[in-house]
Amino acid sequence: MVKTNDFRAIAESNGVEIVTFHLPAVDSMSAEVGGRCYIGMDNSRPMTHAEEQARLGHELGHCLYGGFYTHGTPYDVAERHEVRADRWYIKRAIPRPTLFRLLRQGYDAWEIAELLDTTEEYVRRAYYYYRENPK
């Protein structure tokens, strides 16, 4: 029904390298090294395509708007970077018009997640984000 974003292609076209390794504590992470962004994806357990897209999209959010932090970064600053990365992903994977059209048509969050190839958690986050930011 809805064409999904190919976040691997977006990463490639922006010079972001994706590597997989054992990363079970966080599932995914991103880092800037020498002016280049890298995304690490956990390979210790299988992920659905929707989970992979959501994690990859979130990490691309960090890479493409430059929102990185360290262990020493104050919590409020780190949290702002996380929220911005989520918003980057939400705007691309779950556009406002599409989300509200599907809701008006009576779809539940899990059905919208399946249609948009994302997670139900992100559908809910998108709903609250758009509701709080009607712009």
Image: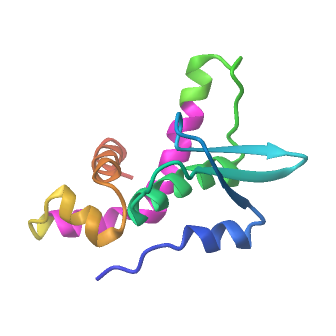
Measured as percent of width and height from the top left, residue 89 is found at: 49, 55
Find out whether residue 26 is within the magenta segment: no
For residue 74, which quarter of the picture?
top right
Q: Is residue 72 left or right of residue 123?
A: right
Say above or below: 23 vs 104. above
The residue lying toward the viewer, choosing from 80 and 71, is: 71
Q: Look at the image and give the residue range highlighted in magenta.
A: 80-103
Measured as percent of width and height from the top left, residue 5 is found at: 49, 72
Query: Which residue lies at the image location 13% right of the left edge and 65% below the top edge?
Result: 107
Q: Is residue 76 left or right of residue 107?
A: right
Measured as percent of width and height from the top left, residue 128 is found at: 29, 43
Query: Which residue lies at the image location 49% right of the left edge and 46% below the top edge?
Result: 86
Q: Is residue 15 left or right of residue 63?
A: right
Name the quadrant of the N terminus: bottom left
Measured as percent of width and height from the top left, residue 72 is found at: 71, 17
Say above or below: 122 vs 68. below
Find out whether residue 83 is within the magenta segment: yes
